Amino acid sequence: MKQISLLLLLCITFGNSVLAQDKDAEQIKKIYDQALTQGKAYDWLNYLSNQIGGRLSGSVQAQQAVEYTKSQLDSLGLDRVWLQPVKVPKWVRGTPEFAYFETSPGLSTNVDICALGGSVATPLGGLKAGVVEVQSIEELESLGKEKVEGKIVFFNRPMDPTLISTFAAYSGCVDQRYSGAEEAAKYGAVGVIVRSMNLRIDNFPHTGSMGYGDTPVSKRIPAAAISTKGAELLSTTLKLNSETKFYFKQNCKQFNDVESFNVIGEIKGSEFPNEIIVVGGHLDSWDLGDGSHDDGAGCVQSMDVLRLLKTTGYKPKRTIRVVLFMNEENGLRGGNKYAEIAKGKNEKHVFALESDAGGFTPRGFSFDCSDENLKQVLSWKSLFEPYYIHLFEKGFSGADIRPLKDDGIVLAGLRPDSQRYFEHHHSENDTFEHVNKRELELGAASMASLVYLFDKYGVITSAK
Amino acid sequence: MKQISLLLLLCITFGNSVLAQDKDAEQIKKIYDQALTQGKAYDWLNYLSNQIGGRLSGSVQAQQAVEYTKSQLDSLGLDRVWLQPVKVPKWVRGTPEFAYFETSPGLSTNVDICALGGSVATPLGGLKAGVVEVQSIEELESLGKEKVEGKIVFFNRPMDPTLISTFAAYSGCVDQRYSGAEEAAKYGAVGVIVRSMNLRIDNFPHTGSMGYGDTPVSKRIPAAAISTKGAELLSTTLKLNSETKFYFKQNCKQFNDVESFNVIGEIKGSEFPNEIIVVGGHLDSWDLGDGSHDDGAGCVQSMDVLRLLKTTGYKPKRTIRVVLFMNEENGLRGGNKYAEIAKGKNEKHVFALESDAGGFTPRGFSFDCSDENLKQVLSWKSLFEPYYIHLFEKGFSGADIRPLKDDGIVLAGLRPDSQRYFEHHHSENDTFEHVNKRELELGAASMASLVYLFDKYGVITSAK
């Protein structure tokens, strides 16, 4: 009798779980179908990219983007849409940069450069000096003051093409861009030129943030990125003639902080309104392209997550919030402000998902969470297989949501195919025509499906 | 004592198997490193696409492609390179097609069309008639002679955007293109216009093969593809005015068969030279673009497989053969001829791999084989994970290698990401700049890795 009861119980439990999986599969199919037939992400991105363009923090375009995305969220019939004020830095590129190298007086070759974000200007008439090429900050240190003083330091370590994740290759190089000027200034360098973070050889210089650490203002030296083709040319030229001089001119400038906003919308949870799920991207971008992949794509996908849940008739149990963060690129003020306010209000965030790795075909997600939480995610893996979403691994989530990290939250990042990303990232080549509609929509649907599952089943909390 | 021996045996077996996996991982890493740093595929494709261009069977360009790829294989130091003669059909597009629709006399709108491959020409002065729009061959049949006679039939069923594999969406539509004219002629239609097999709305008409079945020559009607944007425009116009007339003019022509070649190169196996592994793509392409994705990519990847094995110092046990098949697009003569000769010589083919789904990021492979063979492949799955190769499923291999099918062979197809493929396929938009170097190289490395494993471990043969 006892055994029969047990069998019955097992049947019911197993039956229910199969039923639940079927229902989940059905809801997820609805989400993908809706995204691929009625998705809004691509239209929104078209507007952000082609009607507004690059949206550097503190710019008029950033403000236009705030207003546009808020108006679009307003139109979705969410429970609440608001702007969260945040002070952001304002750095302005100024007139187009100009550079050449000179192998002998009068014999010069123009190359494509752009100021790094946060750099100081060159003197008004530009800066000309001899060049020391190094592969790393360690090599710079080994050369010492004697060989560096009065020179422009040229950091030329390329991204490693053998790393399959191009983000890993980026991580292996970006210290040159971020800290190159700070380090070179210690040895008396007068300027810094950094090879663009791009695996392809082409003419686009790629900007990105840099910092001076505690270098006094008077000792800060200008820093620019050179295109990969320019870097190859300069390196070859230096091997032929080590006396080659480099000239560059840029008149970028840091202004006082200005007020800007995170753009937020939410659907109130029906059962656990105090448990908050965040999905987001960053609304600011660099100024050179139109910021379509970085991170217009992540913003419009995140907006579409809420719309997809609504239009497929799903009523969230938890509060689902889209957050378009301001100032990820050169300050992270939006991400920090959002976390600070959430903490101040004692809000309970259970899951946060960021899309900030381009609008390419989604391959999966990486998770910053406990083993137990990852196990929960892996139990959903088969639900994603029909959509070719295979990657569920531990790793980085996203810069804007990271300040929310604590023991009770699962952080995740969408992982699109990364092979083309750094051909666009932070350059004039990050434009709308390089985003594919279906790829973008598949990303939005994948995100909405994961949000749906976390909303429905909640996040396992470890007994600690 | 017996237990100790068993334990020892287990340790040795397990140890050896770990060692073997390590060695395999090492060899596969060598292959990927070599492909991503010294790969030749992209340079070869550049030549094929930009110096030669579209390579329709029987064209001068097809002959140039034969000579070029043979010369490149000659330079690799393979054991043998040869041309395998094969008679191919020769269909020529002629002067550019021209089309418009007319809502009332003199009020016309031009649209982009192209003749379908194998179609007959229109009368010299073109063809003008009323239009019947249908979604399927079934709908055509239901209309019958009364509504179809004297009309141009417009097949307008779009690819299904909710199918994640765009190849599945293609399969669901391509009957309109292949059999539309044959079917419509039965009901007295005078011409056929088919919506292009493209998920995106744009102005590119996409050609592709069609057949007339046993329709007598005198009853054959001309067939053309219209761009998706043109199809939408025409469909809307017909709803507003069902009297709209369509005009098109094309002077394509079928000539007598001409001689062409499969291009073949091989490395002789050191242990089992009579067991043959084939890797290939098709060298012919449609004439509208330059055939970069379809199937220049597959050809240069296949060529690079042999080079990658050689340059990483691997000595194959079995004979590894690259075959660049001629005439996949409109006849499959190359694939059939290759299989016929292999059979005639009693050659034992154990594994064949085709790349004919574009040069995009590889996602995995599909296999036409027994469950037992698939199990063998799945035992290698973890070796591919570092390269984000996740998909190992049963399915279609490739048109050119399919004639080799018998009980003793494993057939496989490379499965690249398919989202962008049909924006290029068979159209003027299939050009070199849409192929990404790293994505192409990753495909070549994935193929070489699978060939390496099948070469090293052989193919399991079922006891039947």
Image: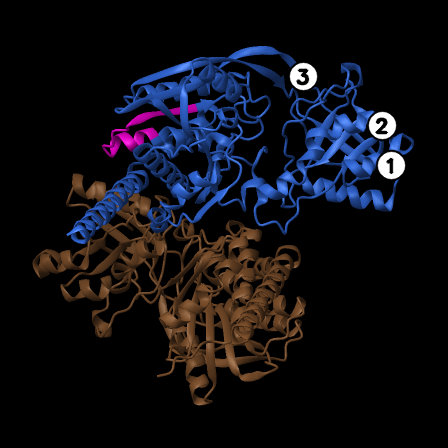
Chain colours: A blue, B brown
Q: Looking at the image, do the residues carrying marks 2 and 1 touch, with CB atoms under 8 Å apart?
A: yes
Q: B117 and A275: which one is in front?
A: A275
Q: 10 Å neighbourhood of mark 2: few (<14), some, or many (≥20)? A: some
- Residue A373 vs B366, above or below: the answer is above
Residue A414 place in picture, x, y as percent: 45, 38
What residue type is disc 3 on? Lys
Q: Which residue is mark 3?
A: A253
Q: Is residue A454 left or right of residue A196?
A: left
Q: What range is drawn magenta here?
A: A306-323
Label for residue A187? 2
- Residue B458 vs A27, above or below: the answer is below
Specify the subunit that label 3 lies on. Answer: A
Label for residue A143? 1
Residue A453 seen by the camera: yes
Q: Earlier in the sequence, mark 1 or mark 3?
A: 1
Image quadrant occupied by the C terminus of chain B: bottom left
Q: 10 Å neighbourhood of mark 1: few (<14), some, or many (≥20)? A: some
